[in-house]
Image: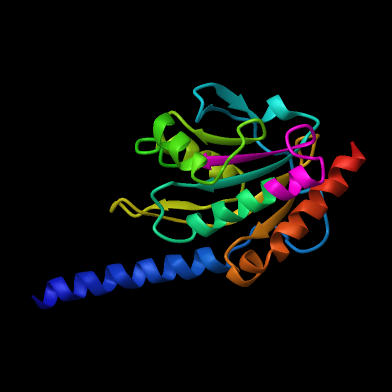
Amino acid sequence: MKGLAKHWFTAALVLLVIAVALAIWRPWPSGGKLEMLGEAPDFSLESAVGRRVSLSDSAGKVRIVYFFFSHCPDICIPTTAMLSKLQEELKARGLFGDKAVIHSISFDPERDTVERLEQFARGYQADFSGWHFLRGDDEASVTELARQYGISVINLQNGNFMHQNYFVLIDGNGQKRKYYDANDMETVVSGALVKEMADDIERLAKEM
C-alpha cells in the first residue's frame, strides 16, 4: 500500500509540474504589438459540414486559430462562447466571412466526429460561412499541428487533455502576429478580450 501511495503521489506531482509549466510557458510574445512571429503552418482538415478546409483557402483574410476539444470539462466551453461573441462583433463591423474567419481545431478527432462538431458548433450559433470547426485524420497529426502553432497539448489518457488555451492571430499573408491568453476569465467575461481581438483584426484587415 505504501508503494502504491508513493506511486500516485509521484504521478500527481508530475502532473502538477506539467500544469504549472503549461500555465507559464510562452514561447512567443504577447501584448499590444502586432509583431511578425513567423509563418503559420498550412493545414487541410475536415470541417463540421464535411468538406476539406485549409488555412490557404482564406489567404488575404485575417484568421483566428483556436485548438480545443468538445468534451472539455472546463475552459474550452467559456472560450468557445467568447468566440461566438467575437463572431457577432466581427459581423457588426462588416468583417466576418469576407475579411476575417475563425478556425476552431479539435485535437480529439476520434470523439469529435463531423456530426459531433456540427452539433457542438450549432450550440454556439456558429455561422459556417466564416467560422470553421475542424478535425484532423488522427490525434497525433493535430497535436503536432498545435505544437507548430506554439500550443502544447498533452493527452492525460483518461478522456481529458491538458492544453494551452490561447488564440493565434494570423494575418492575410499567413504570418502569425499575436497570441491572446483566454485563461483570464475576467477579460473573457467582461468582453475586453473580444474588443481587443476585433480591434486587431480590423487593423490587419485594413492593411490588406
In this rendering, would 33 be left or right of 52?
right
Comparing 130 with 56, the one in front is 130
- Report the residue that reaches farthest toward the left: 1
Q: Is residue 204 left or right of residue 86?
A: right
Give above or below for 48 relative to 161.
above
Residue 15 in percent (x, y) is at 37, 66
Write the residue at 25% across / 74% down: 9
Give the residue drawn at x 34%, y 73%. 13
- Residue visible at 72% across and 65% down? 192
Asked if residue 111 lies left or right of residue 41, the reply is: left
**Quick check: can you spot residue 1?**
yes
- Farthest-out residue, right: 207
Which span of residues is magenta-colored?
A: 88-105
What is the quadrant of the N terminus in the image?
Answer: bottom left
- Viewer-proximal residue, 15 or 187? 187
The spot of residue 109 in percent (x, y) is: 41, 36
What color scheme is it? rainbow
Question: Eyeballing the image, is 17 above or below 80?
Answer: below
- Residue 51, picture quadrant: top right
123, 153: nearer the viewer: 123
Name which residue lies at 75% across and 43% down.
Answer: 91
User: Which quarter of the rendered picture does the C terminus lie within?
Assistant: top right
Please give left or right for residue 12 compared with residue 40 in the image. left
- Place of residue 94 in the rendered image (x, y in percent of width and height, measured from the top left): 82, 40
The answer to whether 57 is drawn above or below residue 120 in the figure is above
Total numbered badges shown on the rendered structure = 0
165 part of magenta stretch: no
Q: Is residue 113 visible?
A: no
- Magenta span contains residue 99: yes
Spot occupied by residue 59 in the image (x, y as percentages of width and height): 76, 29
